[in-house]
Image (tube, coloured by chain):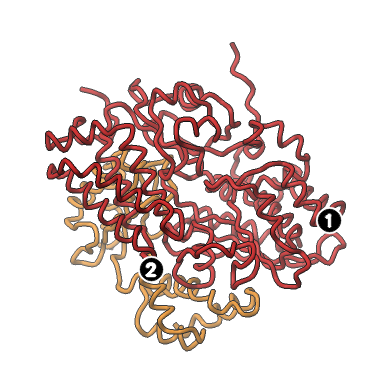
Chain colours: A orange, B red
Amino acid sequence: MKHLIAEFDQLRARLPAGFDSSMVLPCLRRIQEDRGYVADSDIDGLVEYLGVPRIQVEEVLSFYGQFRRAPVGRCHIEACRNISCSLLGAERLIDHLSAKLGIRPGQTTADGQFSLATVECMASCGTAPMVVVNGKYLESMDAAKVDALIDANRVRAAE
Amino acid sequence: MNAPERRNLLMTFEVTPTSHLLADFRARGGYAAVEKALRTMTPKEITEEVTASGIQGRGGANFSAGRKWGVINLSDGQPHYLCANADEGEPGTFKDRWILENAPHLLLESMLIAAYALQVRHAFIYIRGEFDLPYRRIAGALDEAYAAGYYGKPLFGTDFTCDLIVYRGAGSYVCGEASGLLSSLEGKRGYPRNRPPRLTVRGLYQRPTVVNNVETLSNIAGIIMDGTEAFKSFGTRKSPGTRLVSISGHINKPGVYEVEPGRPFREFIFDTCGGVPHGRKVKAIIPGGISTKVVTGEEVDRVRLDNEDLATVGSGMGSGGMVVIAEGTCMVRLLQVLLRFYHHESCGQCTPCREGMGWMHRIIDRIVAGEGRPEDIEQLKKISAWNDGNTICGMGDAAGYAALGILAKFGDEFEHYITHKRSRHDGNLECRAST
């Protein structure tokens, strides 16, 4: 985490005085972007840098759905299963993804290439069903598009 | 007969690859309203103008924006904060995304006016953590606005300066609730807070704070530029202006539309949005995000799209997130999707919601599995009633409303499922061509 401190300092300078506590979310986001998840050593480093109680960082990590304490697959697929996506075939799409990858939501393939998760409404209802792949929205999805996505990632991994 | 002329306040330009950029926004007359406000009006006059416009919050609560602003004491000698709520997460709602992606400068200009009216030095946009393009668009627009000197520097010969910080969430439905949002902005769990004190008295770091929805704020520039009478010429007396409605589900033309309150609901669904796929009938519509009560197809035929008329069928415009449900859809499995969501998103602070959502979720799972008990419907209603008014934020109430709305209007489907241990509609959620 130490190599990110210069960036954290910049953000700190933009916030009003007395807002150090507000740095917890953006710092954790940046750490996760960098490492792929938040490690114990990151928590230690952040507590020391911000001077916030350790429990605050732990509480934030366990509360917000986007934070991860362990790595996921190199291609992390999150499929929405809320109302509009469900009305447009999300269940079939998630079953298809599971079958194609050989894993259930919450799991990672043995080679570490893919992981699958289900998520709730992403505000992408007009283009349902949708999935998020490594943070990018892919909208109006169907089985063929999902197959193409997975195959392209497999080829990339093989190269 | 020609379709009546549609008039818009927000979707007034053609979306092109450059329409979100500063140059295009200026060419459309952008940043003239903030100049008018700062050069010719006092902060108090702006709040009076916003109050007189009658604009109500577009996030779902419909509270008067002007009255919220009016609570801020401009001479109390302490910092005030302004925060745009861009944590759009009410299922079915994606209208603020349209503004963030296509008209980010309209929000930034309106926030400058609001910040001046409320004497705010630091303003925030709290944007949901999952948003990708909307975040890049608003962050890009803010860079342009800083470079052009609208933010971070004294404006138009006054000593008013405002800084704005875009703050990203990290995945939590309850942070869309204003006090939960501020807890999150303080770098903590997004726990909602008890009122009183109101956030306009003690908000962010215990300072007076105004939290407004993105769409509410984006209307401010127009109100200041064209005046309250122009604004009130749109919509109805009680619901002035326009509403962005995002429509999805079983509908031929999903998307974001700008709607004048008072339009016949049916006309909007069939003429504007192309009706239901495969010529199906409307079974039900959730009019304003899943926390508003469902409206039946028959009710859609006779009500108008505004809060007053929707109230006559027990519902409202909510957050503008409309979900269309076609004939042949299983309402039991639909409610299962909703209750699973509420259970997942309960923050755990209040016992009725934390426990109640879990109970409701388990009961509906049991019914869907064919193991429902005759008393289950009453039990769902009872738990909903226990929640109502007994939780810190409205989420506990909202989950109950969603369940009560569906149970009141489609209760026979639940009885059928429990008695026959199977869905009357084969568990269908999708609207596919019949074979």
SS state under label 1: loop
| Location of residue B249 (image quadrant) | top left
Answer above or below: position of B51 versus B120. above
Answer above or below: position of A78 versus B298. below
Residue type, mark 1 in image: Thr
Q: CA distance from mark 1 to mark 2?
A: 43 Å
Residue at (42, 57) in percent of width and height: B173
Residue B91 percent location from the top left of the image: 41, 47
Residue A93 percent location from the top left of the image: 26, 45
Say few, some or many: other residues with alpha carbon within 10 Å of mark 2 (under 14 / 14 to 19 / 20 or more).
many
Left or right: where B99 falls relative to B267: right
Q: How many marks?
A: 2
User: Which residue corresponds to mark 2?
Assistant: A63
SS state under label 2: helix
Residue type, mark 2 in image: Phe
Residue at (47, 63) in percent of width and height: B192
Residue B111 percent location from the top left of the image: 68, 56
Q: Residue furthest bottom?
A: A48
Q: Which quarter of the figure is the C terminus of chain B placed in?
A: top left
Q: Disc 2 sits on a residue from what chain?
A: A
Say few, some or many: other residues with alpha carbon within 10 Å of mark 1 (under 14 / 14 to 19 / 20 or more).
few
Residue at (34, 59) in percent of width and height: B352
- Specify whether residue B248 is in view: no
- Specify whether residue B199 is in view: yes
Q: Disc 1 sits on a residue from what chain?
A: B
User: Which residue corresponds to mark 1?
Assistant: B42
Residue A122 percent location from the top left of the image: 41, 51
Q: Nearer the viewer, residue A111 or B298?
A: B298
Q: Which quarter of the figure is the N terminus of chain B placed in?
A: top right
Badge number at residue B345: none
Residue at (29, 30) in percent of width and height: B431
